[in-house]
Amino acid sequence: MKVSLFIPCSVDAILVDIGKDMVNLMTRLGFDLVYHDEQTCCGQPFYTSGYIKEAKNAAKKFIEIFEHDEQIVSLSGSCVNMVKNEYPKILADEPDWLERALKLSEKVFEFSQFMVDVAGIVDVKAGFAGKVAYHNSCHLLRALGVKEQPIQMLAAVQDIELVPLNSAEECCGFGGEFSIKYPYISESIVRDKAKNFIASGAQVLVLAEPNCLLNINGYLHRYHPGYQAKHIVSFLAENIERGAKL
Amino acid sequence: MKLSPRMFRKVAREEVAEQEQSNNRVMLASVANDLCDTAMSYYGDYSEQDKAREIAGNIRHNNLQNLAELLEWFELNATLNGMNVLWAENGEEACQMVEEIIEEHEVKTITKGKSMLMEEIDLANYIKSRTKTTLHEGDLEGFIALQNDTIRFNTAIPTLNLDLSEIVEILNHRQNMPHTNEASEVVDYIREFLRTKFKQADMGITGVNFAVASTGSLLLLENEGNIRWSTSAPKVHVAIMSIEKVCANLDDAFYLSSLISRNCTGQSITTYVSLLNGPAKKEEKDGPREVYVIIVDNGRSEVYLDDEFREALRCIRCGRCAVKCPVYLRIGAYPYGNPYPGPSGTVLMPLLLGLDETKHLYQACTLCGACMETCPVEIPHLDFFQRYRQLKASGDKEYEATSNIWNKMMFESIAKGMDNNKRYERALAGLRAYTKNFVTDNYIEKMPMPLASWFIARDLPEIPSQSFRAYWQEEGFRTAKEVKEDE
């Protein structure tokens, strides 16, 4: 199955390892990966800060690059939401572009959504003997309605013990420009997320959103260096070898 | 203490610090949330609850579509019921009307129920400064807030921000209430105090939950009894409402009421439900002799003109969005600087006060969507915030939005850098080289503006020497373009 990689800026620039993990995992599972190196940003930061012209340009460029692909998969529910749900809104006044946006919209998926709903893969044959908690990222949960898919994939990991996370559906406090403009409020929110993670007794906090990862791990690295959040793709990729041996 | 949304950042920072000491607010809100979830389960599972929200949203949408007709219909029926219906274009006019009623009936003491609209038009201060009348706040939270010279803090749960000892301290200082460690004694004290006032008052002022057009009635919901007192004991009752409070019939009003109580306090019905149909008839012993309904516009009919913004007027003030909002939970009501703290007010206030004045309200939002998900009348909060941000970014005179030139330049230049992958790669290389100066052990712990504030609470991993695109190339994987060329 052919899959086109939609790599969020934060993954391309900073969280490169998550991107590599996605390549390793999906190649191993037999997917034929393609990558457009013309891709840059989906335009979400411009859009959420109100710069609609810039967001439109980014959207059009993205559509041109990706519209001929069969399936487009990303590691970020937030970026997928931008392409899937917001592009048609911001291009609503340009009928030709709107049509192209709507066509593209049907072909874009977040990783776990794609694996479970499209490829039908729940069990990647990984193993992890330990406690894991899952954080529901906002756009993934509320904008894309992806709630069960990552949990199903985690539950299929051999020997894993999924533990509940208090306020798992509450925002981590990132919010893009919000985290820079209102750092004290943002800190207060992420602090509670970290607290709930630690109280859950989990060794790893798994999530499926690079930006939440930057935020939560940024906080944990400073105040609770022993604790770490992991992107689901990294968690699965890292434990797939162990799973094979188990 | 007069607060303004402009002071948002400063007040929010103080409130965050206080919240971190206790964590009470987050804990209590989660209790309130659970109660509301349980109360909503009356409708069935989540999809059934969604249907209830859709029905309620449609009721409100239809009410608003027919707003002018419903208001006239209400006026007609309320007048037939013997009420005096008055129309106020703005807050000042509404205050003057109340003043005239006070003079006409030689009112000496007033008791008042909780009303956000009265706070919006600052009626209590107007009465205090312009008349000799004594005004008693009948609502528990309002009563304590008044003694403390602050504003009301929460939509539903009284004095969420104060613990018992603080309340005792305030009442001891201002009212000479004896010291106690028992909450019930505090409540008894306030009840005794207020009862005498309710009995003596010659006028009661309340808000309105719904004005019912088909019957000309007023529907009021409460749990404390102060509204029942204020609307039945004094000889004059003044009800004050904003134009969007009207709904077509009793079915609409009760359906919506059920969603208010379930989403506000987690009750299937509030302790008191008052359906008022005008003054006491001649042969009746109890009830007010005169009832006035003041219908206040205060900028709303202008909001109404825009089809999308009109839906801001859907709100039925249950306050559920606030207890779901990660920002509100950390900062509480004060930073918002307006009578409608939390997401619902952030939908409405920018349209009433202008986008510059209220910029922090719609910018201090993570766009998590929890408000929108839970709203019982399906207000699309994020669409509003998105549109406000767009108007603010481009500048708009009508909505009093001034573009911030530095912010604009920054985003335009980032957009330009992202417009082309070669340019993006150069920019990334530049950023990598620059940030290298701040790296220790693979992490950045501090950086200058404009990123400085990120590092107040968080570190950032260094920018690796190899980007994803470089990795792809160096691994020898082919790009989509190359694959296509081969085919």
Image (cartoon, rainbow, N blue to C red):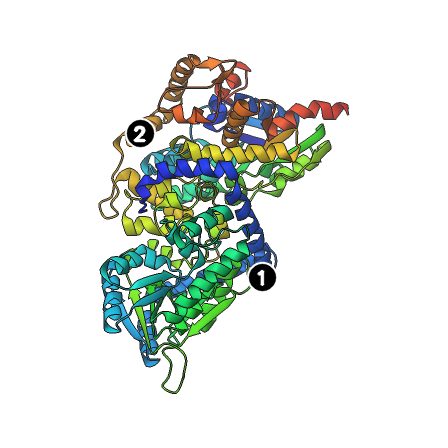
In terms of secondary structure, where does tag 1 sit? helix
Closest to the observer: A76 or A28?
A76
Q: Amino acid at mark 1?
A: Tyr
| Total numbered labels | 2
**Label 1: chain?**
B
In terms of secondary structure, where does tag 2 sit? helix
Q: Position of residue A147 (x, y in %)?
A: 59, 42
> Label for residue B412?
2
Please tell me how crowded label 2 is: few (under 14), some (14-19), or many (20+) other residues with Cα within 10 Å: some
Closest to the observer: B293 or B57?
B293
One can see residue B3 in this view: yes
Q: Which residue is mark 1?
A: B43
Mark closer to the observer (1, 2): 1
Q: Amino acid at mark 2?
A: Glu
Q: Position of residue B205 (x, y in %)?
A: 35, 66
Please tell me how crowded label 1 is: few (under 14), some (14-19), or many (20+) other residues with Cα within 10 Å: some
Q: Quadrant of residue B424?
A: top left
Dot 1 or dot 2, earlier in sequence: 1
One can see residue A64 in this view: no
Q: Quadrant of residue B432?
A: top left
